[in-house]
Image (tube, grey):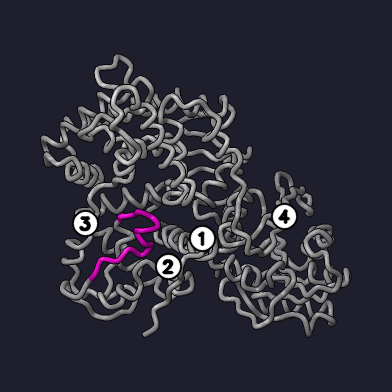
Amino acid sequence: MDYRTGKYYQEHVREVFSQYESIDSPVAKYFPIAFPKPGSRILDVGCATGRDLNALLRSGYDAYGIEPVAELREMAIEQRAELASRLMQGALPGLESDVLYEGVLCSAVLMHIPQGQQLEVFLELRGLLKLGGRLLLSVPDGRGNLDEEYRDPNGRLFIPTDPERIRLIAEQIGFTFISKSTDTDALGRCGYSWSTLIFEKSSDATRPLDRIESVLRNDKKVATYKLALLRAFCDIAERDENAVTWFPDGYVGMPLEAVAECWLAYYWPLISASEHIPQSNTDYPESNRPISFRSSLTELDGLCRAYFDPNPDVAYTLFTLAWKKGTLTNDIARQLSSTLTKIRIALKDGPVKHAAQGEMFKYKEGSIMLDVDLWREFCLSSHWIRDSLLLRWSELCEKFSKKKDPSIQRGVTLPYLLKEGLHEREQGIARRMYEEHQNLTCVWSDKKITLATMDVDHALPFSLWRNNDLWNLLPAARKVNNEKRDKIPTPEFLRSRKDAIIDVWRFANAVEPRVFQFEVGRTLGVFHESRWEQELFQYISERAAVAIYRRGETAWDYSK
């Protein structure tokens, strides 16, 4: 629990106790749904006054409670002596237990957990449950009168707890969603409501993808635009998931600009190719109906080859680095702006408007809107949806080429679809940056390293994330990196190395602030000067957990 929040409860224990005990348990009506087996062993995490714990016992469960505030535990036992053997000290995060439970109740707790610790908390709640065990969560839907750090006038922390975001985190680490309900505030406070969610710990990693498959299979294919849009959703879901905005009407908003930048990266290699690879059924040489941004992107590619390097791959890589640094020439910057404008128009007027007969997406105030269930599918299954998209894209290009140039087969197109710049040049900026570090140590082991013994390690393996952002390129001893390779650091190990990782990030931000903040802002949606470290660490921990618990990748923990 957040320190200032805990201190408030310590100093106002009688007031809090009186308020909580003035009403019956508002979550008791969900016990039969969440915990259907009578007599199940249930743990109430953050049980406060013992009100909900007492309701569990009265309902016939073998219930126990954990509460971090000693004063609340003491008063709970003073009022209900039967709780003496069932109340224990403990706090989230940092909760450990040798006992597994059939059910866990966690009511009105998550909003008091700092944002950078929420994944850790979910992993701990998961670790308390037997396979098939149920988790019952209750969170507030919103709260007014908070400052910019999400604290109320009493200093208590109330982190926003969007129920759809909570559902996504839970499903990413192996929970199955059961149900969600909304209730008015039991204390009768105006403008307050609560969401109650039920999950089951499951090993099932399969997801229904009927709507996405329907677009791929049934929509008319006159251009590659729909495939490019779905690919962008996959990449943003996997790489920049926090860049989206969650709306209370059941939609997620994805910045149109972010999708346009993805398209720029996808289409650049195709359009700069030595062969003409058509991207629509009218996009052939000398056509008067090419794709709308072909000429603009061709001109941008030409400017970059003339300025940076004649090799298109080198030119694109150097262009990307200059863009992040804010050092593009005026001519290239103007052409980039013009190209992105044409891509945005193509997006809005094409796949956003027409996919699934216009019923799948919509555009609103600079964002592409899609419903949360569809977004959840991308977040949970993007790694293999993308593979299918790339194959279908190459097949579609072959189909478009059949009459004009039969030599453009899928085997010709696929390598261009997989191009992502020259990774060794992108990693070179990290290596040059670490050359300026006075006391270089391995981020995983604390071992002293020199430039001769250093590897630049992808914390999240490149083979899985295709991510060369500076925050993902960390200095490691070569021997340690050889042991790690494409394995995933466990969330627990990441927590143990948190200070070392954040120290490296701060150094990168000091040496290459424009590049670092550009990349972090793209990943998180915005670069918050006051809290980017916690938000970025939460992100990297979530990605690691998804890889291990959802995708079954090999976990890694350095042992000295």
Cα–Cα span, label 2 and label 1: 11 Å
In which quadrant of the rendered view does residue 215 lie?
A: top right
450 versus 297 height, above or below: below
Label 2: few (<14), some or many (≥20) within 10 Å?
A: many
Q: Residue at x 31, y 29 (%)?
A: 406
Helix, strand or loop at mark 2? strand
Cα–Cα span, label 1 and label 3: 27 Å
Comparing 314 with 254, the one in front is 314
Which of discs 4 and 1 lies nearer the camera? The answer is 1
> Left or right: 432 with respect to 121?
left
Q: On residue 89, which mark appears? A: none
> Which residue position is annotated with label 4?
178
Cα–Cα span, label 4 and label 1: 21 Å
In which quadrant of the rendered view does residue 348 lie?
A: top left
Which of discs 2 and 1 lies nearer the camera? The answer is 1
Label 4: few (<14), some or many (≥20) within 10 Å?
A: some
Indicate whether residue 292 is drawn in magenta: no
Magenta region, residue range: 455-469
> Which residue position is annotated with label 3?
424
In which quadrant of the rendered view does residue 266 lie?
A: top left
- First of labels 2, 4 by sequence position: 4
Amino acid type assigned to the residue bearing label 1 in the image? Arg
Can residue 23 be seen here?
A: no
Residue 311 percent across, percent down from the top left: 14, 41
Q: Residue at x 73, y 75 (%)?
A: 65
Q: Residue at x 71, y 48 (%)?
A: 193
> Left or right: 46 with respect to 183?
left
Amino acid type assigned to the residue bearing label 2 in the image? Ile
176 versus 46 height, above or below: above
Q: On residue 551, which mark appears? A: 1
